[in-house]
Amino acid sequence: MKIKLGLLYGGKSAEHKVSLQTALAVTKALDHSKYEVHPIYITEQGKWVRGERLEGAVSEVKQLQFPDEKAFAPMTLNTELFPTEQAKEDAIDVIFPLLHGPNGEDGTVQGLLELMNLPYVGNGVLASAAGMDKVIMKNIFAQAGLTQPNYVWYIRSQFEANKEVACEEVEKELGYPCFVKPANLGSSVGISKCRNREELMAAFEEAFIFDRKVIVEEGIIGREIEVGVMGNDNPSCSVIGEIVPKTDFYDYKAKYEDGSTGLLIPAPVSEEVATRMKEEAIRAFKSLDCSGLVRADFFLTEKEELLINEVNTMPGFTPFSMFPMLWQEAGMTYPEIIEQLIQLAIERHEEKQKIKYTM
């Protein structure tokens, strides 16, 4: 009996196109003799569309989209709500959310799947929400004793009430250069590097297009190194990788469009640094109560000071993204990584079924 796997992709997010790339890659890599694949596409307007099951891998992104199909209520994925023979036949066994950014990676979809009592790949509601909000994430990291760059943050109304005061605070607390980012977005969307007051003011305006909350971080002179973490209660780490941007910093264009970034896998770091980094990555993973997977991003200074930048609870997941490449260097193929994540989802769901909710 094949496992009925729902691939949930697209989404009402600025990272919609990134999700399409991920869904296509996963679809091609799945073992179709083991999985019955059910595409579930979320349009940029938030409309849910369920396509016909796939008998084999598809070759083009457009074949994964079903914009002309009739929308359906997401709750119909749960056979318990519709206990008919047809509903049981159509029911999904496990969901793989291949969503990036708000309305997908931030705990909203995870909460829906929890209510539906469906197993799903990746992090739960708490870890997804905290991992998406960079301010909350960094506050938790600080509580866990993790060393990280200094930061300040603002909501739009606070900034607009006195823009000059906000800029003065950034200059006093962080100085230049600094980085302005939307608090709840990934893939380097809306991020700006600032070297003076004029650039800082423009960066605030840009970031507030994408979020009502903005974080400003001090610029760190150091190497950008990353590690993959996979597991549930007892996670393990991949090898270490290094990002070598050929541009000023690792922005959206460098990540997805022009290939102007070098990757060193494994990264040329000492055994001591690698061990320390893996320990810190697992501590970050556990501090957010993560499950399934994260990619943990660090800075390494010339003095070998290690500072955690962030974790990504649904990292880029094409075969050429950093997370899969790190695990491939550790000896796992791309299909094996997918298989492991699905099994971790099922194990976590079975563990939750042991919880008693009534007296």
Image (cartoon, grey):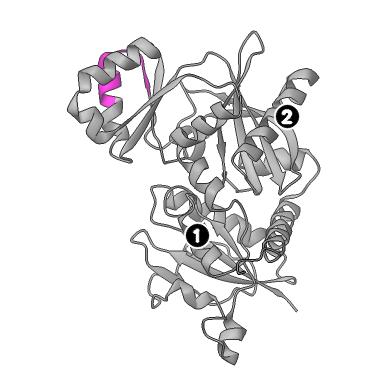
Viewed as shown, does residue 216 lie left or right of 283?
left
Quarter of the figure that contains the C terminus: bottom right
Viewed as shown, does residue 160 lie left or right of 8?
left
Task: Please rate how many residues cluster around mark 1, counting C-alpha atoms within 10 Å: few if below 14, some from 14 to 19, many from 20.
Answer: some
The percent coordinates of residue 69 (x first, y second) are 40, 76
Query: Overall secondary structure of the magenta stretch?
Result: helix
Q: Is residue 239 above or below residue 14?
A: above
- Amino acid at circle 1: Gly
Query: According to the image, label 2 marks what residue?
Result: 279
The percent coordinates of residue 304 (x first, y second) are 67, 12
The percent coordinates of residue 79 (x first, y second) are 57, 81
- Amino acid at circle 2: Glu
Q: Hey, which residue is sitting farthest top in the picture?
A: 303
User: Is 196 one of the magenta-colored residues?
Assistant: yes
Q: Is residue 308 above or below residue 183?
A: above
- The residue range painted magenta reads 193-202
Task: State the residue at coordinates (30%, 39%).
Answer: 212
- Circle 1 — which element? helix
Residue 37, by quadrant, is bottom right
Q: Hey, which residue is sitting farthest left in the picture?
A: 161
Question: 274 or 188: nearer the eye?
Answer: 274
Task: Estimate the spatial distance between the alpha carbons at disc 1 and disc 2, rounded to whole Å.
Answer: 29 Å
Viewed as shown, does residue 71 lie left or right of 345?
left
Query: According to the image, label 1 marks what residue?
Result: 111
Question: 289 or 181: nearer the eye?
Answer: 289
- Numbered badge on residue 126: none
Choose the circle earlier in sequence order: 1 or 2. Answer: 1
